Image (cartoon, coloured by chain):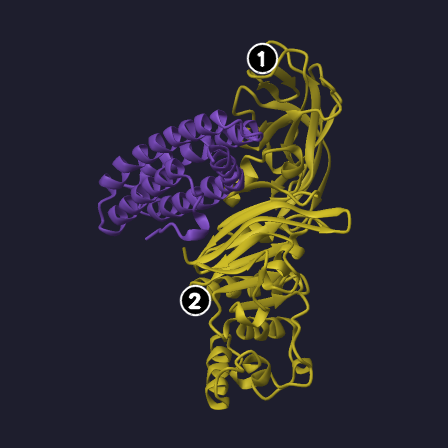
Amino acid sequence: MQGLHIHGIHHAYGDTDVLNNVSLTVPAGELVCLLGPSGCGKTTLLRIAAGLEKLQAGSISIDESVVAEPGLELPPEDRKIGFMFQDYALFPHLTIRDNVSFGLFRQSKQAARDRAMEMLEQVGLTRHADDYPHMLSGGQQQRVALARALAPAPRLVLLDEPFSGLDSNMRARIRQETLTMLKQTNVATLMVTHDPREAMFMSDRIKVMGANGQVLQSGRPVDIYYKPVDEYVARLFGPVNMIEGPVAGGRLETSFGPVDSEDIPDGQIMRVLIRLEGLSLHYHSGAPTDVPVDVLTAHLLGDSSIVHIRMREGPNKGVEYRARVHGSFDPTAHGQVWARVDPRCIFQYPNPEDGR
Amino acid sequence: MVQISPSFKIESETIDNDHRHLVEIINEITKAIDDGQPGECARLVPDFVAFTKQHFDREEALLAGLSYPLLEKHRRHHISLDDKLQIMLNLAARVVEHPPARDSLRKELVYFLLDDVINEDLNFKKFLAEVETDAAGSDK
């Protein structure tokens, strides 16, 4: 298989395990994202794949060739890998052209120069070939870093939080450009990020890593978002409303109606999580499950608003929740407001404190 | 075309043969997509799903017979893949009328086989090798 194949990586610093039997496959032309918090081992895995960190256990193959396994460790320059880091890592004393041609040391000077100019043309920076990195904006520097990573026609590209140094508008633009170029070159790409939205945007597959250096869930972005395997993964994508209660008769009662808990024994305390965007607000009741609520506050964030609501009646009268609605929301414009739940955004997990 | 490279071999005839057959079905599905025969592709996906389930059963029986200590964990992993198999069946039902479903299906099959099935099976490769060595030793 063309691409990256990592199997059974264990890694420890002293007595502390940072990677715990991690395996993954990145076919050529695909982008796989390692998503997780700081310290979960994702950057360590990237460094091991690159050859910047010595492999302790497991194996790594790129395009069918083993590049690392116990007893074999190909140096980074022989793995045909392109890197792109958060801080761009451009050499300040070299021109943009020389930065891009830096990794082409096996080619003649003229060939390296031509290839560098070809790459700079692809990222729209030929006019800056003779400039130095400090003369370019952050976004332009990141484009240079991409050109440099792709110049040697690598078999694998490794991206370590590549856009986190950019402001939000520039980040959106550069990541789109980066994705387009990576797809055009048909290279296998492994990216590390702690930003779930970035992972959702860029990835063909996401590997969610937990604090114990294990892969918790692996799948398409849509599966990770709508079918999180546990509370930790569900909460990665932002704040949630939480309802706790015991299962009775195969269901759990919530403010928004019963949740089916058929396979869960009666009496088990469960946590129901509802994404903020899983609660929609309506000025008219349109479904039998709609529940009347009072709006307490609404905060416009630009493309959406966070609305604080309170149950108006029923057994949970007075309980408060939050909803994220599209655009602005004016609670004074209408009287009665109704809340409705998107069933795709409700998840239930055992309460970790329920010892049964 | 998907090929099983040496790094994906479990070194168990039964399991490697199953993996090889799964690869063959994937390649038939991919060919049907490339040849513009989505109907054929829709017909093959249920075969892939059915054979995958048989493979899981065969593998679990084999590992149970050898008292593989992490069998329960592996069994749970197989169960966790039910959703992904269902996704493939859903995509297969749409490939005739919805061309974008074809690429999604192709991608889903490759990841499923390499990442979710074979990569996980590699976890017991060492165990199988040790069992074989022990058996060879006791035959002497």
Q: Secondary structure at mark 1?
A: loop
- Residue A93 seen by the camera: yes
Residue A192 position within the rendered picture, expressed as x and y whole percent measured from the top left: 61, 56
Residue B43 position within the rendered picture, expressed as x and y whole percent measured from the top left: 25, 35
Q: Residue at coordinates 34% horizontally, 43% vertically from top-left?
A: B20
State which tag comes first along the sequence, 1 or 2.
2
Above or below — where is B31 with respect to A350?
below
**What is the residue that sits farthest to the front in this orientation?**
B140
The chain whose colour is purple is: B
**What is the residue that sits farthest to the right in this orientation?**
A15
Q: Give the residue at mark 1.
A: A250
Which numbered circle lies on residue A185?
2
**In the rendered structure, the residue with mark 1 lies on which chain?**
A
**In the rendered structure, the residue with mark 2 lies on which chain?**
A
State which mark lies toward you, 1 or 2.
2
Q: Closer to the camera, B118 or A127?
A: B118
Q: Closer to the camera, A169 or B123?
A: B123
Task: From the image, state the color of chain A.
Answer: yellow
Above or below — where is A101 with respect to B37?
below
Residue B69, quarter of picture: top right
**What is the residue that sits farthest to the top in this orientation?**
A249
The three-letter amino acid code for the residue at tag 2 is Thr
Residue A89 position within the rendered picture, expressed as x and y whole percent measured from the top left: 66, 73
Q: How many marks?
A: 2
Q: For the residue carrying disc 2, how many other residues have a C-alpha within 10 Å: few (<14), some (14-19), or many (20+)?
A: some
Q: Which quadrant holds the N terminus of chain A?
A: bottom left
Compute the Cα span from label 1 to label 2.
52 Å
The three-letter amino acid code for the residue at tag 1 is Gly
Q: Closer to the camera, A238 or B16?
A: B16
